[in-house]
Image: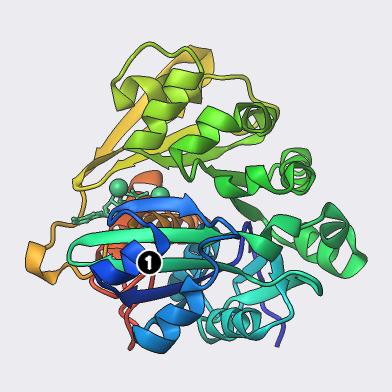
Amino acid sequence: MAGKYELLCLENPILDIQGVGDQKLLDKYGLKPNDAILADPEKHLGIYDELIKDYNAVLIAGGAAQNTARGAQYILDPNSVVYIGCIGKDQYGETLEKISGQAGVKTEYLYDEKTPTGRCGVVITGHNRSMCTDLAAANNYKVEHLKQERIWKQVENAQFFYVGGFHLTVCVPAIKALAEEAAAKNKTFILNLSAPFISQFFKDPLDEVLPYVDILIGNESEAAAFAESHNIESKDVKEIAKEIAKLPKKNSKKSRTVIFTQGTDPTIAVSAKEGGDVDVEEVPVHAIAAEKINDTNGAGDAFAGGFVAGIVQGKSLKKSIDMGQWLAKLSIQELGPSYPQPKQTY
Ligand code: ADP
Ligand code: MG
Ligand code: MG
């Protein structure tokens, strides 16, 4: 049965290949124990098969917004979430498609015949985690795919759009197409800031999309990077959120909400109100004993998944944030950006 598919997500589909490594592996590929880099084609591409063959690596459907899509679908009724991005025609792509399918997410991938599926090697040594991403096919998403009749119908059907900021390096026209659809029909457009480098090095595309953003999500370091690149003087996360909430907006029927998570510190949410005022909420995280934490990789993605599920269900802002905290707490007890089975309910 066709579902309602009211949430449509767009970003870079990446397969995480995550294994417990050792110094020898880090040395071989010249990786720092705690780092996130883009793979150098001359140097790093062997690591993916090696992690699988020699380090018992697990394959996890990754890519920030795809993690969020799986997280939202974890909570929502069946057939609620569609995810779009570009993969290759290979074994990694098949794995990605299978894992998302098992999570109940409907994938509408563009297939790039000539380029391999994007991969992120995650080498765990003790509490450290070294990530090495080869964007590959994910970098080749094209707006023409989105505009095909069959896909665009699903865009028209959706009421909520969630875009990962990492996609600002890939296909701004596709992001703009979703943003304009949202503004024209008073739908909800949600953007995640994804990483400090987006505000630092992709400020122009970010600023092009920002007027369409109804809900902006980020963490404390992304808030700081945004402030720095946008001449916001304050270092205070709440003050930064206030400034962003008040920036110009296309759809004047919806005011903007800015949400910043801060690891174990409370999440800040600022909503603009008419007349230049703002509402501020502070929502504590769900505390968890340190020894229960398995892997905080993807905490923010899980938060966004729970939060967006709440928004789709029409829950209040505060309740939706609490749902995000709840799902993040579940996810950090798993390996990688995953969610526990059997399913727990909020
Ligand atoms: P990111 O993964 O983007 O850096 P954060 O580190 O801010 O995002 O984490 C997002 C959310 O995950 C937090 O708001 C919180 O709900 C949850 N979280 C992260 N770390 C912990 C922790 N140690 N204990 C409990 N919750 C956590
Ligand atoms: Mg963090
Ligand atoms: Mg994050």
Q: Is residue 324 above or below residue 82?
A: above
Q: Residues within 10 Å of mark 1 (few under 14, many from 20)?
A: few
Tell me which residue sits at (59%, 60%) in the image.
Answer: 42
What residue do we see at 34% from left, 86% from top? 341
The residue to which callout 1 is attached is 28
Q: Residue at x 43, y 14 (%)?
A: 232
Residue 74 appears anywhere in the view: yes
The quarter in which the C terminus is drawn is bottom left
Q: Is residue 231 left or right of residue 302?
A: right
Single out the residue that lies furthest toward the right.
149
Task: Identify which residue is drawn at 44% across, 80% down.
Answer: 50
Q: Nearer the viewer, residue 335 or 58?
A: 58
Question: Image check: 213 left or right of 309?
Answer: right
Give how far across and how far down residue 277 sits, in percent: 43, 16
In the image shown, does 134 or 147 lie closer to the viewer? 134
Q: Secondary structure at mark 1?
A: helix
In the rendered image, the quadrant that contains the N terminus is bottom right
Instruction: Name which residue type carries label 1.
Output: Lys
From the viewer's perspective, tell me whether residue 86 is left or right of residue 36: right
Eyeballing the image, is 276 above or below 63?
A: above
Comparing 127 with 240, the one in front is 127
Colour setup of the view: rainbow
Is residue 12 shown above or below 238?
below
Q: How many numbered circles are shown?
A: 1
Task: Please provide percent x and percent y for residue 90.
Answer: 69, 82
Residue 23 lies, in percent from the top left, at 25, 67
